Amino acid sequence: MRKSILMLAMIFSIGSFFTSCRETAEDKNDNEMEMSDDMDNMHDEADKVGNDIENAAEDAGNAVENAAEETGQAVENAAEEIEGQTNDDY
């Protein structure tokens, strides 16, 4: 009777061991899938941020070009006005 109880206890222990290892392996796969999804999401967000930075830089460049163009036109207009005043005086 004692040997049969010990055999049942040993079988239960071994069964529990393999069952718990299998669950851990499944949990590991689930965690790896979640981590993979999180990495994909993070990559997508990084791409969006990169695109936003590129757009902001492009907008800033356009603003600088427009400001330089307007300044150039203002200088030309001022030069023409001064030239016109000098020609009128002579």
Image: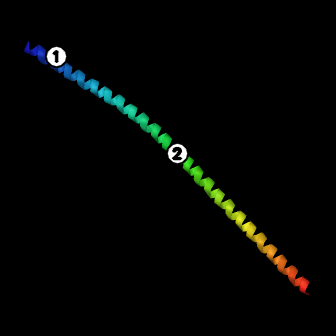
Please, what is the three-letter code of the amino acid marked with disc 1? Answer: Leu
Please, what is the three-letter code of the amino acid marked with disc 2? Answer: Glu
Among numbered discs 1 and 2, the one appearing first in the sequence: 1
Q: Which residue is at the front of the view, 2 or 58?
A: 58
Picture disc at residue 8: 1
Up-down relation of residue 25 to residue 62 (above or below)? above
Picture disc at residue 45: 2
Instruction: State which quadrant residue 85 falls in.
Output: bottom right
Report the side of 46 relative to 7 (left or right).
right
Report the side of 55 relative to 42 (left or right).
right
Q: Which residue is at the front of the view, 34 or 64?
A: 64
- Nearer to us: label 1 or label 2: 2
Count the numbered circles shown.
2
Residue 44 appears at what percent x and percent y?
A: 53, 43
Question: For mark 1, does the 10 Å Cα neighbourhood hold few (<14), some (14 to 19), or many (20 or more) residues?
Answer: few
Q: Residue at x 49, y 40 (%)?
A: 40
Residue 6 appears at what percent x and percent y?
A: 12, 18
Q: Residue at x 61, y 54 (%)?
A: 54
Circle 1 SS class: helix
